[in-house]
Amino acid sequence: MTRRFGCELEFSSSKFEVARLLSKALKSKLRRIGITVTDYKKWQIKDDRSTVGEVVSPISTIRDLPKILDVCRLLKENNIEVTKNDGFHVHVQIKKTEISNIIGLWLRCEEDLEFIFPKHRRNNYYCKRLLRSKKLPPVMSLQEGLEEAEDHHSVLSTFRDDIGTIEFRIAEGTFDPDFVSAWIIFCVKFVEYASKQDSISLLFSKPYKLSMGKLLSMIGLSEKNKQIIMKRKRINRAQRR
C-alpha cells in the first residue's frame, strides 16, 4: 500500500507535558509547540476546539506505521490522558473522483461498523452518522451522505482541496497501539478497495447492508487485524442499550 495518510491523536493532558515527552523521543522531527504549518513534514502538537490538544503525525505511508505506534506507546506508558472528549482521526489521501465510491461503501457498512466503537462515539456531535434512514438502500442515500460528508462534524469529512484527503472521524481517543495500527490499515484499505470498484455495482449489489465480517474480508484486512476489530465489536455491542 503506497497511499499516504496522516493521523490526529487527541489528548486531555497538558500540552507541555506531551511536548516534553515527544521532544526527547522525536528530537528534530517534532515542530516547536505553538508553530502550526500545513506542510505536515514533521510531528506537531496542535490546539483543538473539543479538547486540550492533538498530536499530529507527518504525512506517512504504511512503512511509517512503526514510528506512529512508538509515539502511542510512549504516551500510553506515561499516562497521557484521553477522555470522552477525545478522538482519533485518520486522513487518507484520495482523488476527488473517488469520493462517491468511498461514501457509497461507507453507507453500506455504517450501521454495523458503528459497533466497533463505544457508545459515546455513535452519532456523536463530532462524528454524526451519514445514513439518516437505515431503511433505505445506499443508492437512495448517497446524495444525502455526500452532503452530510461536507460537514467536518460528520463521520467522514469529504475531500479538502488544500490537502486532498478524506477524514475518518469516528474512532474514540486512544493510544492503544494494536487498535491504532488496525484502524489506520483499515482506513487505507477501505479507500483502496472502494476506489477500484465500479460505482454502479458498488451501490446496487446485494445485500445493501454489509456486515463487518464481510467488509473486512472484502477489503483484505489481515486475520490479526480482523480479530482486533471484531473483538471490539463484540465488547461494544453490549453497550447498545
Image (tube, rainbow, N blue to C red):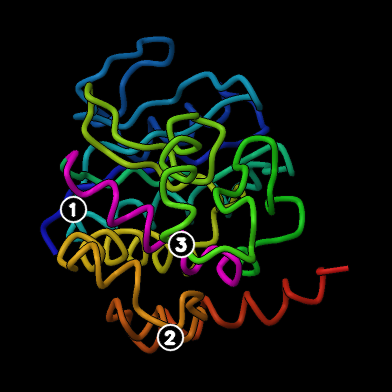
Which residue has dot 3 on it? Answer: 138
Give me the disc on residue 72.
Answer: none
* For discs 2 and 1, the disc positioned in front in the rendered view: 2
- Can you give x and y, in whole percent of width and height, for residue 196 in the image? 15, 66
Q: Residues within 10 Å of mark 1 (few under 14, many from 20)?
A: some
Q: Residue furthest bottom?
A: 223
Q: Secondary structure at mark 1?
A: loop
Give the answer, above or below, for where 97 lies relative to 160. Answer: below
- Can you give x and y, in whole percent of width and height, for residue 65 in the image? 28, 58
> Marks 2 and 1: CB-CB under 8 Å?
no
Rendered residue at 29%/34% (across/down) = 159
Answer left or right for 64 relative to 31. Answer: left
Which residue has dot 2 on it? Answer: 214
* For discs 3 and 2, the disc positioned in front in the rendered view: 3
- Can you give x and y, in whole percent of width and height, for residue 204 in the image? 35, 72
Q: Residues within 10 Å of mark 2 (few under 14, many from 20)?
A: few
218 and 12: which is toward the camera:
218
Q: Residue furthest left?
A: 2
Which residue has dot 1 on it? Answer: 61
Give the answer, above or below, for where 204 lies relative to 68. Answer: below
Q: Secondary structure at mark 3?
A: helix
| Residue 8 highlighted magenta (yes or no) | no
The amino acid beneath tag 3 is Pro
13 and 229: which is toward the camera:
229
Rendered residue at 29%/69% (across/down) = 202
Residue numbers of the magenta segment: 96-113
Rendered-image quadrant of the N terminus: bottom left
